Image (cartoon, grey):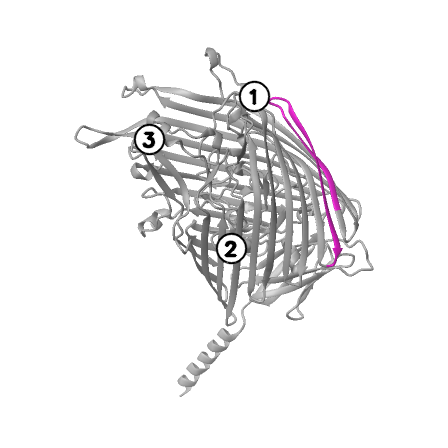
Amino acid sequence: MRKIAFVILLLRLSINLQAQSLTQTIKGTVVDHVSKTPLEGATISLEQNNKGAITDKSGFFKITNVPVGRVNIKITNLGYKEQSIANITVISGKETILEIELQEQINMLSETVVKAPAKKTALDKGIVSVSGKTFDIEDTRRYAGSRNDPARMVAGFAGVVGNNDSRNDIIVRGNSPSGILWKLQNVDIPNPSHFGALGATGGPVSMLNNNQIAKSVFLTGAFPAIYGNATSGVFDLQLRNGNAEKYELMGQVGFNGLELGAEGPFSKKNKSSFLVNYRYSVLGIVSKLGIDFGTGSSVPNYQDLSFKLNFPTTKSGTFTLFGLGGKSDVKVGGDDNFYSGDKQKINYETSMGVIGLSHNYFFNTKTSGKITLAMSGAGVSTKSAEMIFDSTGKYRGDLIDYREESSQERFSANYELNRKFNAKNNISLGFTYNQFSLNYLDSLLDDKAKRTSPLKFKVIRSIKEQTSLIQGFANWQCRPSDKLTFNVGVFAQSFLLNDDFSIEPRAGLKYSFLDNQSLSFGVGHHSQLQMLPLYFNKDYTNGIVSEPNKNLKMNKSNQVVLGYERFLGKKNRLKIETYYQRLYNIPVDIKPTNFSALNLGADFNVIQKTLLQNSGTGYNYGMEATLERNFSNHFYYLATLSIYDSKYKGSNNILHNTAFNGNYTANLLAGLELPLGKNKTLAFDTKVTFAGGKRFTPIDRVSSFKAKEVILFSDRSFEFQYKDYFRTDFKITYRVNKRKTMQEWFIDLQNISNSKNIFEQTYNVYADNFKTAYQLGFFPNFNYRIQF
């Protein structure tokens, strides 16, 4: 009987332990929004109970034994606006770390409370007035169809078109994706995508790891003076710091690959920490399951590594070492090669990497300086081979007929100085020196020497050059009151290759004329270098070798944006923006043609044109509307509508649609999260996208068939569109919290209706017929993640 009673007692203890609520720790820092100096004495309290904490002299706070699930917190500090942050996710497998910024109050007699909906407005460094949006790690995980990719995630935002399933190119307001600027830890970086061409800004798979992203900013136009060398948009990404007090691990497997992550302290005394993540592709396993991801029997391989090491000191500032790198390859052959026929093989390899070291130092509570040194680079290797068959049709081997070895490196040194004079005025100054190195080599098999040994190749492009770009900015922010903020600044850059120089004034304003309504305005002049290889293309007219493109000037753009924002109650927000962009100084042919550099990025081709001039023009204008409910009471939604027009003129002086003029895009994203008891969650997310079809130039079928080569109606550039793009994604997520671990499973059913969206149509000049390639059909994407 005693044994039975003992067993019953153990069972009761086990049941009681399982019934107990799981808890975790919330900790972080509170700093001044402008100066980033720590705020001592700030109070952080949970709205669900009486738990709370007060920041120490380093701005640090910690709240222990917080029940897992969703919590709301309130932050107060004398002289600063009260801030509330709702629906913070607390899981058992990882401590929740927050980086909170408070804005100093101008009018001490008024009580201003910053509610949770405002966290989605871009407030990076306090100087973004229009066309900006922040996002964090939770946003990148939540949206259906995003594949944990920040670039695909922002395709749901107003003004952004995401109607290409094969790549994550970012098309903003009808602009070429080439106009996007990528930044990581305040450093300009190359395209952070696997299988991305040099000079491109997107690719099929992102190298960015959403598990490491801190609050970051995405801008779609009229951006402030701290950003330059971009005409379309800016992706300003920040990496979070590792946990400085506790070691934590993460494992994840899904369509994006097998990932392993670790973080923890180097020293608990000085709060130094590390954060590292490695990923390796698993598409080989996916292909064996019979799932088609758009490459036929060819299997893409890739791997990447990202890290951040943070070393704060008591007197010497904070040192940070960070990096991102990856490499990828794919071998395409036979029927898998849509562009080269069934007797051609292509071996395509890419690589990209960036490593940087920064030192941030506070001279006092009002002034700070930051120096960053970085090295970055990207490379592409391509080999094309003809498949050789004998007279009986037996395969005998491959004959390499084209090869490319190209790379582009950059060294950059940057210094920024920030000075907060008082609650109303602050300035930012910055200077950057960039040194570029280019190595491009394309060669084609010499037909006359074909099948000889060794093979002889004819060089069609050889570039080995160096050049420099110097940049600087100054920005003044003034807040006469809590309701009015304006920014005035100037950005300048000088390209030493041809002494091209650009001075770009910028201005922005935001006026909250009512507690729940505001008007915003932004205007600015922007410029961007051409793709660097374009400057060095060689011309051989009359047997004389020259580089006429070296004199090309920067693309120029004048932009103006007017916005209106209204909070509908405490949970919903309506935002409307209208904009106009004038583009000029665009490279076009000297002879009258329809070519314009505004259309670069519409395909995979590398431009090798010469004899260009900066006489092209273009314009984009449109209206965007966003209706958003941030996550609250287990539910969120985001509805966006963009209507726009994008036109250009080449040297033929004819007004054409640009390659990116889809005219409209609409998105509806929504999600529901259901708690299953205290420790389990079931979530449903969906995304529906309508967008104008891809533009194309009609083929002169009769002339093409006669000439046995594709001939386009050049005076009708991008006149036609494929049928409208439509896609629905549906995602189911199941999360389980246990005592020391969190496990999460999701399945993302992409293009659940299996819509036949046209990717491209090609014409066979011998068979006199068209071949249609479709975008991604129904595709089930799965993912499993564990944190402990």
- Real-space Cα distance between discs 2 and 3? 46 Å
Q: Residue 11 at x, y = what percent? A: 44, 79
Residue 343 visible (yes or no):
yes
Query: Please, which residue is most extreme toward the right here?
Result: 109
Q: Which residue is mark 2?
A: 141
Residue 396 image-quadrant placement: top left
Instruction: Give x and y (percent) for residue 240.
Output: 58, 50
SS at badge 3: loop
Q: Earlier in the sequence, mark 2 or mark 1?
A: 2
Q: Secondary structure at mark 1?
A: helix
**Residue sitting nearer the eye, 460 or 717:** 717
Q: Main secondary structure of the magenta part?
A: strand
Residue occupying image coordinates x 56% and y 27%: 653
Q: Residues within 10 Å of mark 1 (few under 14, many from 20)?
A: some
Span of residues in magenta: 486-515
Q: Say which amino acid is labelled 1.
A: Lys
Mark 2 or 3, closer to the camera: 3
Say what amino acid the circle numbered 2 marks: Arg
- Expressed as whole percent of the image width and height from the top left, the position of residue 6 reads 43, 82
Residue located beneath label 3 in the image: 765
Q: CA distance from mark 2 to mark 1?
A: 44 Å
Instruction: Tell me the kind of residue under disc 3.
Output: Val
Q: Which callout, 1 or 3, points to the residue nearer the camera?
A: 3
Task: Give the position of the N terminus as an image quadrant.
Answer: bottom left
Contact, mark 2 vs mark 1 (Cβ under 8 Å):
no
Q: Residue, x 37% and y 39% (percent of image)?
A: 330
Question: For residue 386: magenta?
Answer: no
